[in-house]
Image (spheres, rainbow, N blue to C red):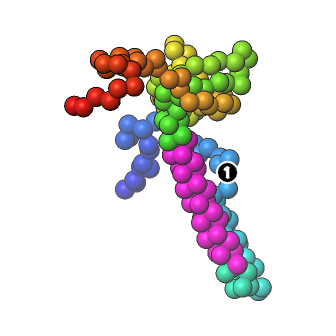
Amino acid sequence: MSVSAIEPSQFGNTETVTRAPKQAMDSEVFLHLLVTQLANQDPSSPMDSNQMISQATELASMERMNTLAATQQSALDIQARQAAAALIGQEITTGSEPPVSGVVDSVSFNEDGPLLRVGEQLIPYAQVIKVNAAPAAEQPVAPEPEGTPGESQNV
């Protein structure tokens, strides 16, 4: 009795899966290289254990640096959001051509960073080169109390 081979088309999957090459060295690639090196080493002269420990330490260091970089980027994003939100109500000037000046009405966020709304324009936070206090609104002047000037009034 003969047994036929199992084909992917029997399961409804006729597409072949191709793996895209990685553009960045990460821990998976590093570990794969280490395992390949161990599997293909010469049995008469095996890899030095100090060298293997050194490579494992480099892997751990690389992972820590990647985690630190991601944490720092996250903190930078939060700081940019807070700084942009603090500009609401402030008068800004941009370094773009032509320069835009005006009071920030609101702030929105997208993948490129904070966007400040000045009137009808959306301005990237990175283009702001000058910040002034918002112009003071005209305050109504209180009328002088009844009586002669310089006379103190008892209430």
Going by the image, does 89 lie left or right of 102? left
Residue 90 on the magenta span:
no
In which quadrant of the rendered view does residue 2 lie? bottom left
Where does the magenta region start and end?
A: 54-80
Percent x, y of residue 90 = 53, 28
Percent x, y of residue 99 = 69, 18
**Which amino acid is tagged 1?**
Ala
Percent x, y of residue 106 = 46, 25
Q: Residue at x 35, y 19 (%)?
A: 148
Q: Which residue is mark 1?
A: 24
Examine the rendering and report whether any part of residue 104 can be seen. no
Q: Residue at x 55, y 16 (%)?
A: 121
Q: Main secondary structure of the magenta part?
A: helix
Going by the image, does 23 lie left or right of 28? right
Q: How many marks?
A: 1
Closer to us: 148 or 72 = 148
Q: Residue at x 65, y 75 (%)?
A: 57
